[in-house]
Amino acid sequence: MSETTAHAQSQTTHAQTHTGQQHPIRLYLFVWGLLFVLSAASYMVDYLGVQSYLRWTLILLFMMLKAGLIVAVFMHMAWERLALVYAILLPPLLVLVFVALMVSEADYTIFTRVAFFGAGP
Amino acid sequence: MAQTIETLGGADLRPAGLRGVAADFSSDQRAFKTASWGKAMMWIFLLSDTFVFGCFLIAYMTARMSTPVPWPNPSEVFALHIGGQDVPLILIAIMTFVLISSSGTMAMAVNFGYRRDRRTTAILMLLTAVLGACFVGMQAFEWTKLITERVRPWENPWGAAQFGSTFFMITGFHGTHVTIGVIFLIIVARKVWRGDFDVERRGFFTSRKGRYEAVEIMGLYWHFVDLVWVFIFAFFYLW
């Protein structure tokens, strides 16, 4: 983390001024390349017509890897203070509870639709 | 690398790990010690935006799961006729690569901003804006194509009517974010180019001193737009 002190002299008077997220350009280029490869891979899932559980697993896997790389490196989350990391990353996980609720609701809706209207709208 | 430095008063006396998190949140001070207010507030705004997009994607999931009418196959709907054959999802793939590239140039702009390289930072930010504008342009093309094929928020030629409403809602909201981002990028790039952050010129709107951190905060917004597209690409176009 020695690069973070590069501009420290001029800014030590400001308690709030942090000295910036300075990381090597190589790292960004590497992640950029990885994101390209992962996007190409998820496109190939569709292009090659992979179906069913393998398709969904691959889509979710590539999606999470891409999202993780963007948040961790491009948005510097890997270097942020843990308090910020938890405050930002934990709440979206609770959305999964909402997802579970709506899955059960959607199952019920389609059940009543099919039961009362047959295969209609 | 997860531990960051405390610039005030030298050593950081707070404990590491979860104990550190508890200490930060229970301290009678700012919780996000090393993140400035500007950065913390952008993160919290992005968290709220996460919930907005989360609700849209959940609404789409619910609609798709609860309709007995077949859902249109996005692979075919978004195919383009190139060289005598239909290439599935090709436009969406190109849009994805354009947006990822814009994220790459933005990350590098932040880096050059902290190196106080005004010229390179501004050029990289403008390049990001151009790529973002390309993305919106391609989205306009995509919308036009679907509208001429009679896709409406209440109907479409291929099956479940909800396809149109969720498509226009989700991509429309994302496109709006990209457009706002492009405007935001141009504004910050102009400030960088003019040297506002070197002389700590006060902002027109906030009258606060401008710092190079503004580039990073702008970058957070831009990467978030790319991040949302990752989820839309997976759930709407590939699923």
Image (cartoon, rainbow, N blue to C red):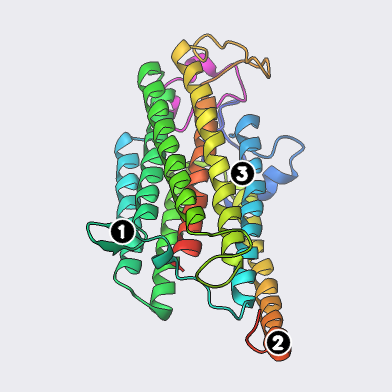
Residue corresponding to mark 3: B46
Nearest the eye: A6 or B20: A6
On the rendered image, what quadrant is the N terminus of chain B found in?
Answer: top left
Q: Quadrant of residue B88?
A: bottom left
Q: Is residue A19 magenta?
A: yes
At x 44%, y 60%, the residue is A63
Magenta stretch? A1-22
Label 2 is found on which chain of the structure?
A
Nearest the eye: B93 or B201: B93
Residue corresponding to mark 2: A117
**Residue neighbourhood size for the residue with mark 3, other residues' Cα within 10 Å, grouped as few (<14), some (14–19), many (≥20):** some
Nearest the eye: B2 or B192: B192
Frontmost of labels 2 and 3 is 2
Q: Amino acid at mark 2?
A: Phe
Left or right: B208 with respect to B118? right
Q: Is residue B85 visible to the viewer in this orientation of the structure?
A: yes
Q: Amino acid at mark 3?
A: Leu
**Residue neighbourhood size for the residue with mark 2, other residues' Cα within 10 Å, grouped as few (<14), some (14–19), many (≥20):** few
